[in-house]
Amino acid sequence: METTKVENIEVHVCVGTAGVASGAFEVLDAFNEEFEKRGLKDAKAIGKPCKTKGTGCRGLCARDVLVDVLIPGEQPVTYEHVTTDIVPEIIEKHLVGGEIFSKSAAKKDYYDFYKLQQRNVLHLCGKVDPEDIDDYIRLGGYSAIKKILSEMKPEEVIEEVKKSGLRGRGGAGFPTGVKWTFCRNTPGDVKYLICNSDEGDPGAFMDRSIIEGNPHCVLEGMLIAAYAIGCTDGYIYCRAEYPLAIKRVKLAMKIAEERGYLGEKILGYDFNFRIHLKEGAGAFVCGEETALIASIEGERGMPRSRPPFPAVKGLWGKPTNVNNVETLANLPLIINRGSDWYSSIGTEKSKGTKIFALAGKVKSTGLVEVPMGITLRQLIFDVGGGIPNRRKFKAVQLGGPSGGCLPESLLDTPVDYDSLIAAGAMMGSGGAVVMDDTNCMVNIAKFFLTFTQRESCGKCIPCRVGTRTMLDILENITSGKGKDGDIELLESLANEIKTSSLCGLGQTAPNPVLTTVRYFRSEYEAHIYNKKCPARECPDLVDFIVADDRCKKCGICFKVCPVSAITWEKGKVAYIDKNKCVKCRECIVNCPFNAID
């Protein structure tokens, strides 16, 4: 870990969504009150004045409230699960006494979480105050837009982005510079730029964390894109379920305009650009760019046929470029550090880093940024810490609800656009849900298809009717009503829906079904022909019994049963009353000895 480059003693408190939910503002207030009470804001007290700063998400959200103590010339120290009552102890022991308060200090696994990460887009999250433009400028912010306005022509900016190899981080992975070229070369005096921050994937929070933790880098990215394309108006489309992100980006827009970074004659140059904020109502389909455009126009969020593509005819019929938050946040890095630096990271066809929301059955869940080309094994076991409770890895679902589920045999697959597509998954916006041997893959396919079917706008028949028909078949299979031919029918429907649906939602919705059939066909067959769920997850196909030979008589299952269906005495094998059991699976999930059959 690098030596801290600060002039004073600083205490950084995570005030992202997870931090706030865990009491971050109260912890921040507690530090300020203690500093005031002890006179630590004065340099005379302990040699250097102590200051606090609220910062964005560091990634390991399950450990919030996270607090960093930064002392000049020393390595930063992170404290986790910080509450107001231990703030005085951290101050007394560490800041005054010079010793780390080991009781709450982060342990080795915290730092292991970051070993293989390469935090480029997220490098200021956890360091910069998201509500202070001067802090962003002090750390190098807005230097990229100054550089291109003073030194580069729009065409040169586009070529630099092309040379970097940056591909869209919203899911499709289309080359960003090429997309810009289409829009710039389309005739028209009025053009628009849209930042897509709809981010509707279950469990995904990459875009939200970037905007919450460093909103000015997104604004600067939009400025760079707008200058390159030749547009004067832009929109940030952010779902209303992100109140903290909306609050901070609104504040950032207001201050940036007051300081001359937005509006007319930006920084004194002949460049005008204004940004408007549109709050989405939470429709997953509005992540698709034409549906998003319809929503901004005040219409129902439904996709439109392409061509014409938005770069030719988009918002209000004008040439429009739509970029994802993470894509835009990469741009200041490319301009400041150069395309050669950027293209040196990653693989031949997938450059740079990618942010993932690592979730599910993995020890260290949270937000990670890794170089393209890292393997799934490294992502899950080295960065994520592996599978908890001594369970066995079973699959990882990549690319959100429209992604694919990849088995253990593909753990050495590189994380890049082409390799994941070849395996049947996709990069998507960056969701990664890890599953262990207690997960039923048929049920997982049903879960994700339920989501996409519910979120279908219904405009085209293949998506509206086809996904409903597939879901009906899956519901029959998981309830013991599956029949011979169901698997083949699912595959046939899935392929038809993929090829005939209007937009990306329908075209990718069958992916979880196709990959689970491809890699876990035996589970489908067990459900259909044996009327059993091998993972013991589908309630209609299982009864729970304690295996006498594996039960360690520990009583864990007795303690976690929410309906008192388990009888246990110390030193005796547990017993499950089938009449009381509601098949919630808490006993299976929590038994470390796999003793529940």
Image (spheres, rainbow, N blue to C red):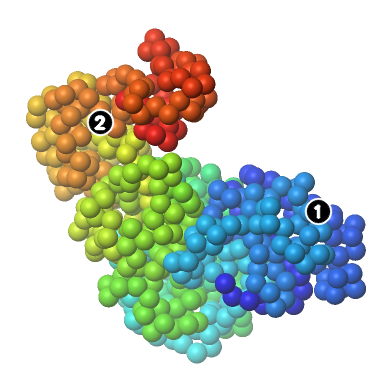
Q: What residue is rendered at 48% in x and 18% in y? A: 568
Front residue of 204/78: it is: 78
- As helix, strand or loop, the secondary structure at mark 1 comes to helix
Task: Using the image, tell me which numbered label, if any, was put on residue 534.
Answer: 2
Q: What residue is rendered at 41% in x and 74% in y? A: 229
Point out residue 61 in the picture as x, y percentages from the top left corner. 55, 51
Residue reaching furthest bottom? 151
Q: Which residue is mark 1?
A: 88
Q: Taking 385 as reference, is 596 left or right?
A: left
Q: What residue is rendered at 42% in x and 36% in y? A: 592
Point out residue 186 in the picture as x, y percentages from the top left corner. 32, 72
Identify the image quadrant of residue 487: top left
Q: Taking 254 as reference, is 536 left or right?
A: left
- As helix, strand or loop, the secondary structure at mark 2 comes to loop
At label 2, which amino acid type do we have?
Answer: Pro
Up-down: is 508 above or below 58?
above
Up-down: is 254 above or below 245?
below
At label 1, which amino acid type do we have?
Answer: Pro
